[in-house]
Image (cartoon, rainbow, N blue to C red):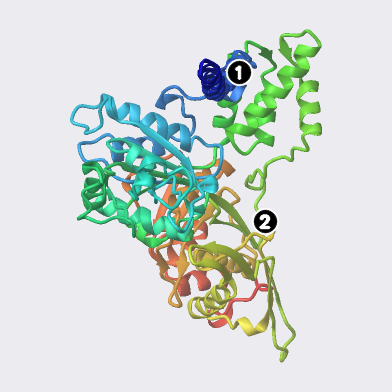
Amino acid sequence: MDKLLFSLMTIQLIFSGIAAIYFYRCIKVQNTTKSLPTLESKKELEHLKRLRAISLTKPLAEQTRPQKLSDIIGQEQGVKALYAALCGPNPQHILIYGPPGVGKTAAARLILEEAKKTAGSPFGKHSKFIELDATTLRFDERSIADPLVGSVHDPIYQGAGAYGSAGIPQPKAGAVTQAHGGVLFIDEIGEMHPLQMNKLLKILEDRVAKFQSSYYSASNRNIPEYIHEVFQKGLPADFRLIGATTRRPEELPPALRSRCMEIYFDDLKEDSLCKIAENSLKQVGFHFEKNLLKKMAAYASNGREIVNMVQMAVSVATMERRKEILEKDLDWVLEIGRYQPSPCEKIAEKAEVGVVNGMAVYGTGGRLLKIEVSAKKVAYGSMGSLNVTGIVEEEERKAYHGTIRKKSNAKSSVETVMTAMEAITGLSMKEYDIHINFPGGMPVDGPSAGAALFCAVYSALYNKKVPSTIAMTGEISLLGHILAVGGVDMKLEAAIQAGANTVFIPAANWKERYEAMNIKVVKVNKINEILEYLYFEPQQDVKQIQENTFGEKEGVLTAEGV
């Protein structure tokens, strides 16, 4: 009996020992499993701290970044418009058009800081500046992930956590909610996906970001109250949008443009580029030859290119242990970077028969449009010809709904000029071989060059020169009326840069501030007024001008008779 009892006790002790060893190992494994993520986390955290401790020198582009609105060079009118649109008691949504590297992003960032300081502005210390780039703004059409509007994490997706196990959808806020009470800046807004654009337009109107999910039920009491609130009322998204783009206005959706104040940033002129170069060189503490500034400006089209040139030239001088930038340094930078001189349109030094300076808008700025005309009278009984060269017949442009091909109507404008010429002078254009050329191959829209075309043909017919310091714009009608055109402000800036001293514009485009411009702006209603200004005494009609000036029989003029 004692032996049996002893055996049972021994067996019991053995099983107890085995059980104890089992539970001990389970606890040990559990602790080890818990400690592994902790150890791995500590290891990664230490690696992250080591990475953060490593830093390079601050790039020159960052050192020279504008710190206040007055630091933005060459965009005084654009900055003033930004201030008016955003710093008042009722700020507006804004679209900024302009080429790259002219200060659009910097101005947008700084204008919010100015608005915060303005009395009566709804922006305050809480207002954030949330920045997105439309070129990298990716989203899922199933609304699984949308960094702009926000998304819903339904319970069927991986990583739904405890809410997912309970079958509860989880709404996640996007940038429109993060920007609530502040500014949402979208760079290259013209690149946005149409579906995202439509969502954004709805939010701009409602000022609320709304969510949907097939897993949401208003009667489900297991869903937390705040999630009910989000699905039923949405997340607040009351912000002001600032969109920047390098595209043309017509390439953006009309629905977006109608909701925004449109502001234009211009191409940087030579003096602005020189100022940026000077500031950059002073920022890094290097001496430089004065002539280097204009040379940099001649090879750069925007501020970023200037800063890149400076940084490269500084590196060359530093390697040679110099604190001065020499011309040879810049020459090497221009050669190694394959920089090409920017097109610099200047008026001709001397006037020539048949040559007139027109004005056009191309891209984001104005351009001087040179027009050349040759006119020769054909033999009696022969038929003259009309030849137009140098125009781009068809231009491919991107639009919101896709790519469009825009045909030039310059030739139809030429035909209008020929008809007007016959009506005003009494000449028959069929008696002349007329060759009209637009040097440079720039796309010519046509109508706004009507007045310049007329004067160039007139100059060629009568062998009378138009002063090279004069430029003109305006559409001409069959009866010689000068009609309004677009882009006059940009055209005037281009004329000033080119060195013109007098510009003719349609009277319908006249603005009082043109009187204060550094150029003489003459408003005209009819082509006769331009001819009188160029050649004759005022108040004479064309028929009297013909008789008095050329002495042709019956008022008929010929190029040979001049």
Whole-percent x, y for residue 97 in the image: 46, 47
Label 2 sits on what residue type? Glu
Viewer-closest of 531 and 393: 393
Q: Circle 2: is it few (<14), some (14-19), or many (20+) Cα within 10 Å?
A: some
Observer able to see residue 509: no
Q: Is residue 399 above or below residue 269?
A: below
- Position of 19 with respect to 381 (left or right) is left
Query: In the figure, is residue 329 to the left or right of 482?
Result: right
Q: Nearer the viewer, residue 311 or 189?
A: 189
* Residue 162 in picture, x, y percent from top left: 37, 40
- Which structural element holds mark 2? loop
Q: In this view of the protein, which residue sits in the foreground, 451 or 214?
A: 214
Residue at 62%, 14% (x, y): give it: 50
The residue sitting at 65% across, 52% down in the picture is: 351
Return the residue nearer the eye: 396 or 242: 242
In which quadrant of the rendered view does residue 383 lie? bottom right
- Residue 35 x %, y %: 54, 20
**Callout 1 secondary element:** helix
Q: Quadrant of residue 201?
A: bottom left
Q: Nearer the viewer, mark 2 or mark 1?
A: 1
- Looking at the rendered structure, the kind of residue marked 1 is Lys
Dot 2 corresponds to which residue?
A: 352
Ranked by sequence position, the earlier of labels 2 and 1 is: 1
Quadrant housing the C terminus: bottom right
Q: Which residue is mark 1?
A: 43
